[in-house]
Image (cartoon, helix red, strand yellow):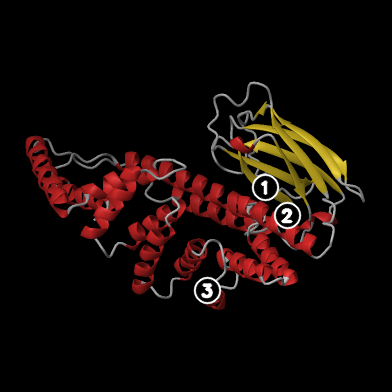
Amino acid sequence: MSWLGFGGLLIAALLFVALPLWPRKPRSHRTRLGVASNVAAFRARRQELDEQQERGEIDAARHRELLAEAERLLVADAGVDSGTNAAPQHGGGAWLLALAGIVVIGVAVAGYMRLGAVPDLALRALLAQDSATPSAELVTRLKTRLVQRPDNTYYRLFLARLELEAGHPEAALAAYRELLQREPDATQVRAEYAQALFLAAGSQITDGVRAEAEQVLARDPGNPIALGLRGISAFQAGDYRAAIAAWDAVIAAAPASAEADAVRGAIAAARARLGEAPPPPLVRIAVTLGAGVAPDIAPDTPVFVFVREWQGPPMPVAARRLRVADLPVTLEFDDTASLTPARPLASIGKIEVVARVALGGAPTPSPGDIEGRAGPFERGAETVAVELVIDQVVAPLSPGAAESPRP
């Protein structure tokens, strides 16, 4: 049983016992709570829509339509439960309520301990730790818990990934095989299994690796792991055109990711084998942190670099995601970095560039983030070269100012 499930049962039990005894509040108080809850839900929905537009999942028109719908729901909900008459209050029963609460909580906690969910809480605390290398304690606890709960696919998948990251492909393979016996149609698990086979074979494509990757692509043609393995298979066989085609598809799936940068290097190697010079980049950005910016910022804090049409739509034309630890860095952008095929970077005449240390983790700006901006630049036949320093703190919105979804 999860912690949320336990909490839900405990609250339900307390309500069952306590509601007949609880002093009732005026309806106007409940109304204020309801309005506050609705406003919080509306703000969360607005942020979700902003992020969807940022990722290119919806366009500006759809964003406005969905936001207007959320606003209508907010207004409609505000008119519900607007009565102000107070209900009668019970004067006695407080001691009984307290006693009932103590009994219910005691029984619930004892039952929770017996059900064995406490080890899950300890495990999840370890899983939540932000560490580049998995601890031996975490791996040991996962293995112990899987003996107790062999049907927990979440823990088994996490164990497989940890073993792979730790350089133990054989142990990872055993975990992946167990998962596939339970869920043979899980394409992502099969793709990771193919990757583990590849690493266990000394980073060589074997018949088994090829068969697993192609089985994944038959069900999920855009799976980046399987596409990457298909590209490696073609490269090792000397079919560099096929390798480039497979790797281009990987980049198209997530052009702003760190993995896409690695794949771009592989494509450059394949072009070199073909005797082709890589096309010159459209934009080259040298990104650095301003003096005194870095000391108090965690190395894994995300950094977003955007190329945007000058005075155009808010969604970037191209983007990369980095970490503070990656800076300083020089990035090159071509059409493969375009976020949507409908707006290739080569089609944009005038651009601006933005680099932001996102302390809140989101690509949209938040107060306290640190950024640098430059532009406009006319994009022509020559590469646009920009030196960008991140040294400006994003200020909070002034009262009454409209929020902007621009990254």
Q: How far apart are labels 1 and 3 at the CA level?
A: 27 Å
Residue bearing the label numbered 2: 337
Q: Amino acid at mark 1?
A: Arg
Label ID, residue 320:
1
Report the amino acid beneath label 3: Val
> Who's the residue at 84% across and 61% down the image?
276
Which residue is under mark 3?
A: 216
Q: Are marks 2 and 3 in contact (CB under 8 Å)?
A: no
Residue contact at pointers 1 and 3, CB within 8 angstroms = no
Q: Position of residue 128 (x, y in %)?
A: 39, 44
Could you tell me if residue 116 is visible in this image? yes
Asked if residue 156 is positioned above or below residue 402 in the image, the reply reads below
Of the pair 313 and 231, the residue shown nearer to us: 231
In this rendered view, identify the residue nearer to me: 384 or 277. 277
Decide: few, some or many residues near mark 2? Use Cα within 10 Å; few <14, some 14-19, many ≥20. many
Q: Earlier in the sequence, mark 2 or mark 3?
A: 3
Q: Position of residue 329 (x, y in %)?
A: 70, 38
Residue occupying image coordinates x 21% and y 58%: 148
Q: How many marks?
A: 3
Which residue sits furthest right? 381
How many residues crowd mark 3 within 10 Å: few (<14), some (14–19), many (20+)?
many
Image location (x, y in percent) of residue 287? 72, 36
Instruction: Work out which quarter of the rendered image holds the N terminus and state it.
Output: bottom left
How far is disc 2 from disc 1 in space, using C-alphas?
8 Å
